Each structure stands twice: as C-alpha cells, then as structure tokens.
Amino acid sequence: MSDVVIIGAGHVGLTLLADLELTKSHHGLAARLLHFGDAAETKERSRPWRRLVMENLVTGSAETCRLDASQFASLRSEEGSRALQSAGIIVVAVPDIPHLRLALLEHLENTVALAGKLIVFVRGGQGGQPVLAKWIRDSPRLRDTSVVLVEDSFYGTRVTGLVVQYKRKLSVNVSVYSLDPDAALATLRRMFPLGKEIGRPSWPDLHVCDGIDLLFNPLGYIIHLGVALDPANVDRTRRGVTYTHYIEGISPALAERLELLDGERVRLAQTFSAQAQEFPAVLQRQYGLAPQDSFYDMMQSCRGIYRSRSSGSIGALRASRVLLEDVPAFHTIRWLAATAGVAMPHTQAYFDDVLAQLRNIGAESPLYTRYRPHLDLIDGGVEGVRHLLNQPHHALAVPCTA
C-alpha cells in the first residue's frame, strides 16, 4: 500500500521519489513510482536506481538514497492499478504533452475511484490547463476530488546515471481546485517537511494563486522553443554540437527578443485580470537570485542552477518535450489572445518563425494541436475562461433575462 503514487519516471518523478525517501522520517509517507512501460521495463528501471547519489546544489552535500524494486511498477499493470486505488495522493510528473495528458486523464477517470484523493499535476499550467479545468467541471466523479496544479516543478534537477543533482525551489506557485482547499494544501505541504530550514511552511514554499494567474506564469513556449529553434542553435544541433540551453543558447540578441515576448505574455495576462510575473522576477522568486541589469544578464546568472543541455541531433530535438509540450502551449496562448482580441505583434512574428523552423527540421505534427478541439468547446469569452480557470468545481452562473 502506498500513500503517494508518482506517475512518470523522468527527472522530476525520480527526484521526487528519492526526496520523499530521504525525508520519510519527517512525513512517514510511503511512495511508489509508476512508469508507462511493461513488467520487463519495471525490472530494468528499478535495478540501476536502487542506489542513487543525491547531490544537493544548495548545501553542496551528497546523500545515498536506497530505493527498493517494489517501489517501481507499470501504470497499466495490476500492481499499478492497486497502487492508484490505495493512494491518497497521485502526483502526475509527466510533461504536458497533449496525447499523453488526455490518455492519462481518461485512464484515471475510468479505472480509479478518485473521490477523496488529491491529484497533483506538476507542470500543470499553460498548454493543457484549460482542458484540465474543463475535465474537472464536466466530470461528476471529480466532484469530491482535489486537484493542485504546480506552475513548473518542485525542483531544478538533472539525473545523470546514478547521480541526481537537484535543488528544491524556494517557492513555487500552485493553484488549488477543491471544495476544501485548505485541507488539500496541507496534504501537499506534508510531502515537503523541511520548511523550518528556510523559515517557511514547507520547502519549497507553496504560494497559492488563482488558476488564471498560474496559466500565464509558465513560459516554456518562449524560453524553450525560442532557444531550441533559434536559427543559430538549430545549426548547432544539425552539426551535433550541444550547448547549455539557458546559458550558451541565449545570445544578447536572442535575449532581447525573448524579453519582448515575455512582455506581451504579461500584457495578455492583464487582459484576463491575471497577475503574471516577468521571467527575471520568476527566477528571483524561485531560486533567490539577485536582480540583474538585463534579461541576458539574468539568464547568465543561472549557471549554478540550470544544467540542461540541448538536444544532440535534429532527430532528438524532434522527439523532445521542448517541441511536444511547448508547441501545444503556444497554440493555447494564441487561442487566449484570440479569445481576448489582443494584438501580439512580436508573438505573432515569433509564431511564424516557429512554424518555419518546424518545417525546416521536419517536425510538423498534428500532435501539437490535439488540445485545440477541447479549447474550442470553452465559451463565455474572457470572463468564462477566468471563471473556469479559477473555479472549475463551480459552473458559471448565467444571468437571467427578462
């Protein structure tokens, strides 16, 4: 029996499993990780990860984390099904890739009794958030289910072999969809019990914001796509040259463009009466970085935090979540701009360039637009979107007409 089930065996899912194991004496929760493979993959995945070295980038310390093979299972196995049924907390730690997210929502609703559970969606904001909110509103079986959306991740983390280099973020924004939001938040905070070390209720501190605010704060469609599909970086990738995505991948000229896109994102948020931070402010909040004189300097100051490297080939780039997650997010932003009737000239020019580069690398795919039919079912204009994103458990009252 598990108290916490993590769906997704990537960097974030594995880091969360190991972190829960290291802090188990504080919270007492048992955790398991479910992947999307079969029984043979369960054996392969669990074998190398039974002894992980956890390098904390904040303290410089290193701990050995021992995981048991029984903590790994396939999502679609009987063992995985039993784990989901018994868990009080289900953490979805897979990217917001449309076909994957939609299939997972269907699997959870059709195979798991969700009443009374807390479902946490890591990287819950942006591309699929309106679709997720509509799923909650339209599904009677979710009436008594609490859902927490996390703006990005609880960590900056990178798993290389048996080494996990990680840093718990100081603060992350979350939105709580629940009939009892205080209880849902307390349940999630229990998973991160070291708050006293930073003088906050949990580490990371969970800052609650409205759902409409959360929708606009992630900017992977800018900071991921804009770097990976920059012509100079595409040329590097085509030649097999890798680079640090957030540092070497951002030139002063590219930083100027990213800053313009970031500004349009914030202005679009204001149209929906949403509170959105510019990206440098997000970095300062999450990691405690000092302000810098320019967007470029702010990104260069992230050398000790962001270790991600670019794809090593065009084929790897085509298969990466940079495209599979962030191109759909861009389509959601365009849908929001159309809903609000807002002109975004820099973003529109950027989108044209993104489409041209996708054609250039042979990465045009209908997978990127899988959310659009669901988005088009959401009506009510700006106020309807606001209400859905803020209170999906409650239908928008329609004014009576005489």
Image (cartoon, grey):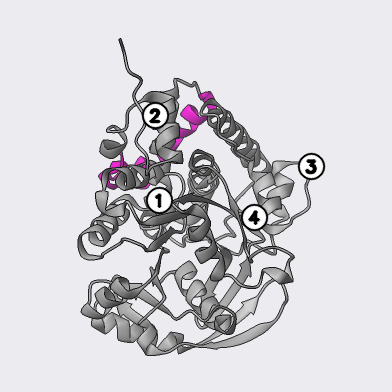
Q: Amino acid at mark 3?
A: Asp
Q: Nearer the viewer, residue 111 or 359?
A: 111
Label 3 belongs to which residue? 293
**N-term-proximal mark, 1 vs 4:** 4
Label 4 belongs to which residue? 247
The residue located at (54%, 32%) in the rendering is 269
Which quarter of the picture shows residue 72? bottom left
Q: CA distance from mark 2 to mark 1?
A: 25 Å
Image position, residue 257 (x, y; %): 60, 35
The residue located at (52%, 77%) in the rendering is 20
Q: CA distance from mark 3 to mark 1?
A: 31 Å
**N-term-proximal mark, 3 vs 2:** 3
The residue located at (49%, 38%) in the rendering is 212
Q: Is residue 151 left or right of residue 130?
A: right
Q: Is residue 395 above or below residue 106?
A: above
Q: Are marks 2 and 1 in contact (CB under 8 Å)?
A: no
* Number of the front mark, 1 or 4: 1
Q: Callout 4 environment at 10 Å: few (<14), some (14 to 19), or many (20+)?
A: many
Label 1 belongs to which residue? 325
Q: Amino acid at mark 1?
A: Glu
Label 2 belongs to which residue? 384
